[in-house]
Image: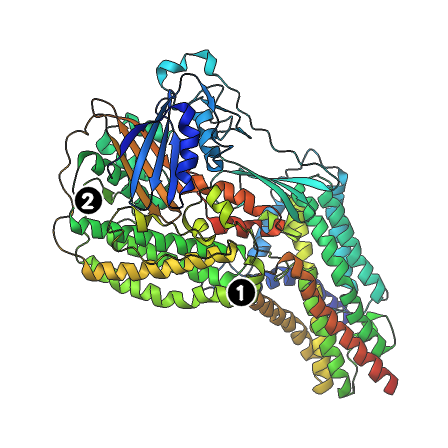
Amino acid sequence: MSTILLWLLTFSCLLFLPSLTIGIIRKTKARLQNRVGAPLWQHLFDTIKLLRKSETVSENSSWILRVNTVINISIMITLAFLTPWLSFKPATSADDLFLLIYLFAAIRFFAILSSLDPGSAFGAFGASREATLSVLVEPAIILALSAVALSAHTSNLSLVFALTANTPISQAPLWLLAGAGLFLSSLVELSRMPVDDPTTHLELTMVHEAMMLENSGPNLALLEFSSALRLVVLYGLSGQCFLHALHCIWPFASAAGILLSISIIFALAVVTSLIETVSVRLKWTRAPEFVAYGLTMSLLALLVALVTGVSS
Amino acid sequence: MKISLVPVPQAQLSDNLVDWLHVEDRRLGLISSLDGGQLVTLVLDCTDASAQCWLTPLDSDVYHSLTPSVPQAHWFERALNDLFGIRAAGHPRLKSVLQQSSCKGNLHPLRSIAQCGNPDHGHKSDNSYLHVSGEGVYEIPVGPVHAGIIEPGHFRLNCLGETIINLEIRLGFLHRGVERRLTEIPWRSARFVAEAASSDAAAACAIAHAIAVESMSDITVPERAQYLRTLALEVERVSMHINDLGGMSVDLGWSWLAANLSRLRGMTQEMAALLSGSRFLRNFICPGGVSVDPDARLGELKRMSEVVSKQLEVPINAFFDNSSVHDRTVKVGEISRSAARELGLVGVAARGSGIAYDARQHFAHGLYPALAPAMAVETAGDVLSRLKVRSAEIVGSLDLIRTALDNITSGTTSSELPNKLPGDTIGVGIVEAFRGELIHLIFTDKHGAIKRYCIKDPSFNNWTALAIAAGGNLVADFPVCNKSFSLSYSGVDL
C-alpha cells in the first residue's frame, strides 16, 4: 500500500478513533448497567458543541490557562504522530523512547500549572493529586518501554515496534508483560478507575476532572479531545505489545495488522468499561498499591528482557 | 400522646435539663419558643413513652445559654437567635442558621408581630467561619450550588494536604417559612404543608402531623387505617434506605450496584404508588386515617415486596463482601457512643454508634410499638456501621410489610374530624422517619387556631455529627461520609 494512503488512514484514526473509543467505553458501561446509553459518537458531538460555545474565563486566571490548551493539544498531536501506537503508521525519525516519555511529562507539567493558575481550591488539589500519581506511574511506563527497547537493542520505538518476521516465541512473555504493565499504568495515567473516577460529579474526589473545572467552551473541547487522544495512543501502545506477543506465536500478515491494531484498542476499551463497572474506587491512600501492580509487570518484563538478551 | 405543660423558671431550666438527660432513657425532644417571649422545651421519656413540655417565660431577649451544660442544645439556640431574636448569652459559637439572603436585617420570621417593632432585639447575623491557620492549611469551599442536583448547603473544609482538619456546615439558604405558614392556613389544610416540610419523608411528616392533631381532639383512628399508615411509613423507609445505599454506591464509584439499586428503588416507589396512588406517598395520610383505601391493590403490593426482598439479597451483601468497600468505610467518619449521646443523635447515625433508640420501639404511631421490628444496632460508629444498620432496617421493614399485609383487617379507613381543634391544647406527634425521630408539636390558642407549629426534623440533631465525623478523614472520603448520614437540608431550612 502506498505511503500516502497509510498517512491518510493514520490521519483519520487520529481524528475519529479517540471519540469512538470513548464512545465504546461509555456505551459498554451503559449496556452493562442495563441502560441504553448515549450514542456511540456522543463524544464527537459534544466536542463540536463545545467548539461553538462561548467561554467563561476566571478573572483571576492569567495567560497560562489559555496557553496550556494550545501546548497540550499540539504536543499531544505530535506524540500521536511519533508514537508507534498503530502498526501501519509510517515510521518517523524522531521517535526516541525518552523523547516520548518527556513529551508526556511536558503535557502534565503544563496541565498542573494551568490548574494552579486560577487559584481555585479544587484545581489546586487536583494538581497535587495528579503530580503524586504521575511521580508514581512514570517509572512503570519507562521500565515497560525500556524492557522492549532492551530486547531490540535500540531506543527508537519505530524500530522496536516494527513487526519483524521470525521473532522467536521466547519473546512472547516479554511483550505480554510489557503490554500488561503499560495498560495498568495507562489506567492511572489516564485517570480512570480504580484510582480516579471519570464519571464522578463529586469535586472533592476528582483528580483529572478537578484540573479541568476552570476550562469551558473551545478550551474544554480541545482538552477533552487531547485526553481522548492520549487514551487511544496509550491503549494503542500497550495493544501493540500484545499484538507482538501474538505475532511471536502466530505471525499474521501486515494487512491483518491494520485491523488488529484498531480492534485491540477497542478490546482494551471494553476491558476498561468492565473494570469500571465492577470495581469500587480505591481509597486515595491505596492508590500506590494499584500503581505497584503495573510497576511489577514492567519489572518482570525487564527481567525477562535481561535474561533473554544475555542468552541470545 | 397527651402532654403536660410544666412551668420551669429560667434559673432552673439548665439544671433540670441536665438532671433529665442524666437518665439513660430520657431524651431532649426540642427547644423552641412560641412567639419569642418564652422558651419551650420538649423532653421525652422512653421508658413510659411520655413527654413533658417545659414552659420557661423570659423577661428579656437574652437568656443564659444551655449549651455549655447540654451540648445538644447548641443548634436549637442558634435557631432561636435567628428565628425569634432571643439570644443565648454564653453560647460558645452563636452563628446564624439562616443566611443573609433569606433573613434580611433583623427580621425574625417567627417572632410575633407585636414584638417585631421593638428595635432592641435586633441582632446582626454572624456568618463568619472558624479560621484555621498554619503552614500548608488551605480552605475548600463547597456549595451552596453543588455538582449534583441536591439542596443548597455550604461546606467549608479546612485541610492540610489530603486530610480534613475542620469542617463547618452552613445551611439556611432557603428558609421557606413552613412553620409560620402552618399557623396561617386553616388547620384542615395544614396536612398538605406539613407533609411538604421534608418531602422525601412525606409519609413520616404526614403521620407526625396526623398524630399531633388526633392527640389534641381525641380522635381514634380505625385499625385498617393504622395498618395502612404503618405500610406507608415502612415502604417509605425501604425506598429511601435503598436510595441512600444507591447514593453510597455512586460515591464509591461502583456503577453496577448503583444501577441495580436505582432499579430496585423504582420498584419500591411502584409499591408506594400501589398503596397510595402516589410514588412519593403524598396526600395519603391525613388526620383521622388515610385518604384512600388501596383495596385489591394490596395483593399486588405483597407480591412486589417479595420480589424486592429476593432481588435485594445480592446487592446488599455485595457491600459487605468487597474489600475495597471495607477500605473506604471502616474507621471513616467515626462518631463515638459518648459523642452520639452528647449530641443527641437520632436514627441510623445513633444506632450506628451503639445508641439503641428507635422511636418505633417507644412511641405509639401506626401499629408501633406492638409491631416494631428488632432494632439494628452497631457499635463502631463508622460509615460501615451505618451501612449495616441501614441494610438491616431494609430487611426488617420488608418483613414488617409482609406481616402487616398478612394481618390487615377490613373496615373503614378514616374517622370524622371535629370542625375545630380544642383551644389551649398541645398536640405532639413523634415518628421514626427513615432518618430518625421526627417531632411535630402543635400549640393552639384559646379559639382553637394553631398559634405555633413546631417541627423538629431528624437531620436537625444529626448535622453537627457530620461536621465532627468528617474531621481527620481524607478529603476524598468526605462524600461517602456525608452520604452515610443522609441528611435533609429542607428539613432544617423550614
Nearer to us in this view, B118 or A39: B118
Identity, as a three-letter code, of the amino acid under mark 2: Gly
- B196 displayed left or right of A267: left
Residue B381 to residue B136: above or below: below
Name the quadrant containing residue B199. Answer: top left
Q: Find residue A140 and name its label.
A: none
Which residue was labeled with disc 1? A277
Query: Label 1 neighbourhood size at 10 Å, few (<14), some (14-19), many (20+)?
Result: many
Disc 1 secondary structure class: helix
Residue B268 lies, in percent from the top left, at: 33, 57
Residue A13 seen by the camera: no
Nearer to us in this view, B316 or B57: B57
Residue B198 lies, in percent from the top left, at: 37, 40
Residue B97 lies, in percent from the top left, at: 49, 31
The residue at 59%/52% (across/down) is B477
Which quarter of the figure is the C terminus of chain B placed in?
Answer: top left
Q: Gap in Å between the C-alphas at discs 1 and 2?
A: 46 Å
Q: Chain of mark 1?
A: A
Residue B489 to residue A311: above or below: above
Mark 1 vs mark 2: tell me if same chain: no
- A289 displayed left or right of B319: right
Residue B434 lies, in percent from the top left, at: 37, 49
Nearer to us in this view, A81 or B405: B405
Residue B387 to residue A264: above or below: above
The residue at 35%/26% (across/down) is B8
Identity, as a three-letter code, of the amino acid under mark 1: Thr
- B319 displayed left or right of B9: right
Residue B213 seen by the camera: yes
Which residue was labeled with disc 2? B289
Disc 2 secondary structure class: strand
| Number of numbered markers | 2
Q: Are marks 1 and 2 in contact (CB under 8 Å)?
A: no
